[in-house]
Image (cartoon, rainbow, N blue to C red):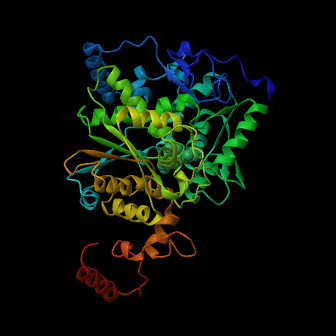
Amino acid sequence: MAEQVEVSIPASARGCRLRCVACGKEFERAEQDFRCAACGELLEAFYPLRETGNPARAGELRATWLERRKSFHRLDQSGVWRFRELLPGMLDWNNVITLREGNTPIFELPRCAKSAGVRRLTGKHQGMNPTGSFKDTGMTAAISIAVEEKFRWVACASTGNTSASMAAYAAQAGLRSLVLIPEGKISWGKLSQALDYGALTCQLRTDFDGCLQLLREVIRRLPVYLLNSVNPYRLEGQKTAAFELLEQLDWAIPDHIIVPGGNLGNSSAIGKALLELRELGLISRLPKVSIIQAAGANPLVRTLRENGGKSLVTMHPDTMATAIRIGNPASWRKALRVLEATEGTVEEVSEAEIALAKAEIGSDGVGCEPASAVTLAGLKKLVAREFVAPEESVVLILTGHVLKDPEYTLKFHRGDLFKDTSYDSDPKMLDGHRSEPLILDADADAIVRALERAEKAGVR
Ligand code: F0G
């Protein structure tokens, strides 16, 4: 394998540079672990030559992006590359690997709005991406760079969605992929995706944080391209969720955007996108970006609560929302900056609150995986805290598809989600939200009786 890597391409050839988020040192090329060679913190991409604050240019960009929606060109059909003026460039645009990611819908959530106590609520469903999660928007960007840099292997540690996405994009690109996942702590749906797309899949007896630690060791020893969200190019692709959201709202700025927090890459990317849009004059003010974590995996909440954000408080995470079962989030500094810049906040939610919120999102006909449902559960608390007012506009970022974790959904509706667990749950709170499957005789009368009983019981 040793001879496979060529000299890496300087960032300026892509119209950007890399900068450390802690010490500010700038780089043309990243190390293989994408950490600052001086202080070890994460890097971010920035665009020194970009024209800012020119209203004519802002109008041109809006028109160009909209015009591309009519095009059949592969880059224009991607909801990521449609915004390519604000992304790292390619040396050859034919090297872009796309599965036509992005272009995800915004759904109305009327029952959820009522339950949260806001007049209107919408969710941008990033689970409607090709592999069923928001990861695809970042993966197209970073995999395309791996192709240009002539890597043969790509790798990630994952709670499931990153691995599914990476495996798919690697397969499309003709690259090999290595997946490190915590054994027994990812949903079957996600694991099956990695297998189907042909990844070398290793289930390790540790958690996500342990997998990432081991992967850092592997990449020091082998020329493998790292595709976790410490890779700054992934976050560049993930920015497009915010570009697309604003475009879909006809550039009307929502008051609040609510995002789940795990490794904290997504909240960082969305915040970065909003700051760039403001700098370019495409929006005049910032929505407040708030981050919600599961109470059993709440290192960001603790970091703010216990030391005002000075240093990361790590923990052993524990939540059934396995996608966000992370105790040592890599992008915590970036996320803190987003909270500060947008005047957002953090909140934590219990396992029962997550389960209830997931069922409520399902009852609006939308559905999502457990980690995405923390957004609604968190919103309820933000309304109670009067951080969100009932008349304000709120967008939830729903990060993963309902079919990602059917086991969780089935257990919930059968009433045994909390069986044999030590999680605190209030079964009464979940009453009326379950729709248990019925097993009936093959008999029309039995079906009619079931329907009549359901009608009498009222709407769920
Ligand atoms: N929602 C879902 C469905 C996720 O899969 C993840 C992260 C998050 C939210 C949190 O996003 O890490 O950017 O703060 N999943 C990663 C993975 C860690 O490996 O799939 P984040």
Q: Is residue 58 above or below residue 250?
A: above
- In which quadrant is the N terminus drawn? top right
Q: Return the residue nearer the eye: 281 or 402.
A: 281
Q: Is residue 365 above or below residue 265?
A: below
Q: Is residue 434 visible?
A: no
Which quadrant of the view contains residue 169? top right
Q: Is residue 195 above or below residue 146?
A: below
Q: Residue at x 42, y 34 (%)?
A: 338
Q: Residue at x 40, y 61 (%)?
A: 358
The x, y position of residue 40, in whole percent, is 65, 28
For residue 166, side relative to residue 274 (left or right):
right
The x, y position of residue 424, in whole percent, is 49, 70
Q: Return the residue nearer the eye: 53 or 162.
A: 53
The x, y position of residue 272, in whole percent, is 42, 30
Q: Is residue 13 visible?
A: yes
- In which quadrant is the C terminus drawn? bottom left
Q: Is residue 89 above or below residue 258?
A: above
Q: How many marks?
A: 0
Q: Return the residue nearer the eye: 134 or 172.
A: 134
For residue 109, side relative to residue 80 (left or right):
left
The x, y position of residue 419, in whole percent, is 54, 76
Q: Residue furthest front?
A: 307
For residue 364, side relative to residue 217 (left or right):
left
Q: Residue at x 61, y 29 (%)?
A: 41
Q: Return the residue nearer the eye: 323 or 5.
A: 323
